[in-house]
Image (spheres, rainbow, N blue to C red):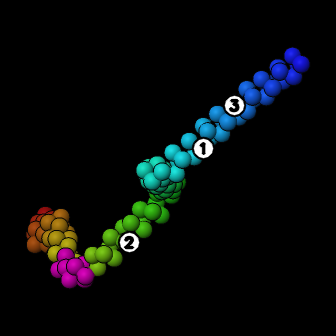
């Protein structure tokens, strides 16, 4: 009979341990399914998703700098296409006038050259 009593005590202990484990799991599940916990988990996952997306974009930019930079410049130009259409002719004319003035400044005067050539011929 003493063996039976020990088996019953051991079975009661095992059942209490199992019951306690089930209560812990149930409490954890209830805590996880509370609205506040669901919102917190959603915020965390959204933050992780944004961080992952930012990491992917950053890595793509590091790997492909030139194509992305060209696309950014093209996008910026497309956004400003109307002001560019309006002001480009004026800007082109100013650039052309500036280039012509620079060429004239560095070009030797033809009158001075003719005078030097006459002096050389006279000698």
- Is residue 89 inside the magenta stretch? yes
* Residue 38 numbered tag: none
**Secondary element type, mark 3:** helix
Magenta extent: 82-91
Task: Count residues near mark 3 (Cα–Cα under 10 Å), then give few for <14, some for 14-19, many for 20+.
Answer: few
Crowding around mark 2 (Cα neighbors within 10 Å: few <14, some 14 to 19, many 20+) is few
At x 36%, y 67%, the residue is: 73
Q: Nearer the viewer, mark 2 or mark 3?
A: 3
The percent coordinates of residue 77 (x first, y second) are 32, 73
In depth, the one of 40 and 105 nearer the eye is 40
User: Can you name the residue that lies furthest to the front here?
Assistant: 1
Q: Is residue 38 above or below residue 10?
A: below
Distance from disc 2 to disc 3, alpha carbons, whole Å, reads: 71 Å
Whether 114 is drawn above or below 26: the answer is below
Dot 1 crowding, Cα within 10 Å, few <14, some 14–19, many 20+: few
* Res 16 label: 3
- Give the left or right position of residue 48, taking residue 22 as reference: left
Query: Which residue position holds label 2?
Result: 74
Task: Pick the residue in front: 78 or 16.
Answer: 16
40 or 118, nearer to the observer = 40
Label located before the other in sequence (1 or 3): 3
């Amino acid at each position: 009979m003493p063996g039976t009593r020990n088996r019953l005590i051991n079975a009661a202990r095992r059942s209490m341990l199992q019951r306690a484990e089930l209560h812990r799991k149930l409490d954890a599940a209830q805590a996880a399914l509370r609205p506040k916990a669901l919102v917190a988990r959603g915020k965390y996952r959204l933050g992780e998703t944004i961080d992952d997306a930012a990491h992917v974009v950053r890595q793509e930019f590091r790997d492909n700098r030139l194509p992305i930079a060209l696309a950014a410049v093209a996008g910026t130009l497309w956004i400003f296409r109307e002001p560019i259409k309006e002001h480009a002719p004026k800007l082109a004319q100013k650039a052309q006038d500036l280039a012509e003035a620079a060429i004239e400044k560095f070009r030797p005067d033809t009158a001075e050259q003719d005078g030097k050539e006459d002096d050389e011929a006279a000698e």
